Amino acid sequence: MGDGFMVEMTRSELRADIEQGTTQAAAKAKAPPLTAEEQGHLLDIYASPAAFTAVDIGDQVVLSCDGGGSKLTGTDMQDLLESEQRLGQDILELWHIEYSYKAIKTILPFQQQVMQNAQLMLTAPIQYGAQPNLAFYSKPDGPADNWFELLPKGDIAGARAAIEEAMEYATWDFIYVADGMIEAGADFFSTLRAVKHVREKYPEAGIELGMAGEFVIGVHGELEWEGRRLAGLWPREQLEVCQDAGVTLFGPAVNIRSGKSCCWNTAYSLTVIKPCMEVARIPVHPNVGEGVCGVPVNGYPPEDAASRAARAFVDILRCDGL
Amino acid sequence: MDVTHALAAGMGGIRTAGDLVARLQMSRGMRLKEAKEYVAGKLGCTVRDLSDSYAMEQIRGEKGLGRILDHSNLHPGEPNAMMAKFRIAELLGIRINSVEKFRDLAGL
């Protein structure tokens, strides 16, 4: 199940869940459902009694990270070395346990030194990972008014102004950290704005942008990126604005429904993300981390479920990585 | 979960050519098929060899691109880490930021 609980299902029950998952996703995202052949392949993957499954030889893809490793493995350097030498990760990631740009800004020289040392010791590419966490810029944690307090009062204009103020802070923190990291070796709008700035300053820098969910909620409601309203964007449109902003790798994410089966969730996720593959000019790495894209929301995602999700994305979407 | 994904779908990092294909995705924004074909062309091998740890161990050793080091496979005197990245940048014809920073800071 989507929460990691083990259940036994018959082949016909699995088939019914796959049909229901893809049908519901198609209706919500206004995308075509999976073809009969794709649904059949997904059924074969999930109906297998094997404890583990994998893609065919030669079909392997590039693995990038959203965090990754273990913060309990000695130091960041040891953690990165283990990820390279033991796990065989394709792209490594240096990150801080407080994954927010606002907090990282205050310890940037420390993180820069780790990055510089790691670059001397490792062969595989190392990216730096963090996220905007827009709410940290609102009261009581930050200087901007809290839009979630203003909205219930009906102060729509005040809430929008507060979001815009927070986005300004988030954008500049993102750029500050990116500058520092590249020199050492929002929500959506502020992220796009920061990506565009970094891309203009560093034309050859690799920038991976991973989403937090399948759908841009858009609390502000009126924000646009080069004429396109951001609220309500699904993965295909998210990819289009990201690649236009200068992103190098795009990571769509579809939130798990914990009460649904894993095959329902994977069918749903594949249907929502599949339209990306038709318009992608850049590599697409669907996020198959904990609680997204068919991987259960569980601290220890069962390997039978995680490996089935990974294989399904590679086999059916022909994605460029995970 | 990292281990699960690495075994189920990952190219294998420096155990194979996963890091090399990744560099083309990161630096040139190449899609997977294009990136694999580019790397295979530069290495003079087939695309399937790229995720074959036996083939890539030989190729990486011959070209000095860095290999996994453990108690039974040690290669003193062979390039690894930053030294290997100099060779990777040259072989693939890409700019690797950490290599450029090293060159500047070392006064090379």
Image (spheres, rainbow, N blue to C red):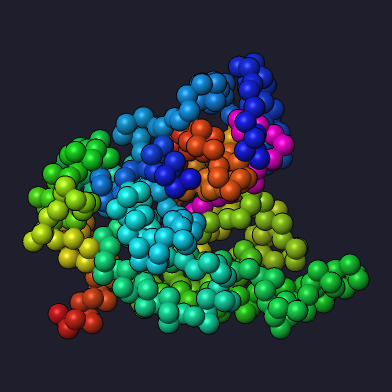
Q: Confirm whether the magenta stretch covers residue A250.
A: yes
- Horizontally, is A279 left or right of A82 in the view? right
The residue sitting at 38% across, 60% down in the picture is A79
Viewer-closest of A96 and A318: A96
Q: Confirm whether the magenta stretch covers residue A237.
A: no
Magenta stretch, main secondary structure, is: loop
The residue sitting at 69% across, 27% down in the picture is A20
Q: How many marks?
A: 0
- Looking at the image, is A91 positioned above or below residue A183? above
Q: Quadrant of the C terminus of chain B?
A: bottom left
x and y percentages locating residue B86 in the rendered image: 18, 65
Find residue A228 and report its image quarter.
bottom right
- Looking at the image, is A164 positioned above or below residue A86? below
Find residue B52 and report its image quarter.
top left
x and y percentages locating residue A91 in the rendered image: 37, 55
x and y percentages locating residue A160 in the rendered image: 77, 72
The residue sitting at 32% across, 74% down in the picture is A116
Viewer-closest of B53 and A286: B53
Give the residues drawn in magenta, as a range.
A247-265
- Horizontally, is A47 left or right of A72 in the view? right
- Horizontally, is A96 left or right of B7 in the view? right
Q: Is residue A265 visible?
A: no
The residue sitting at 47% across, 66% down in the picture is A95
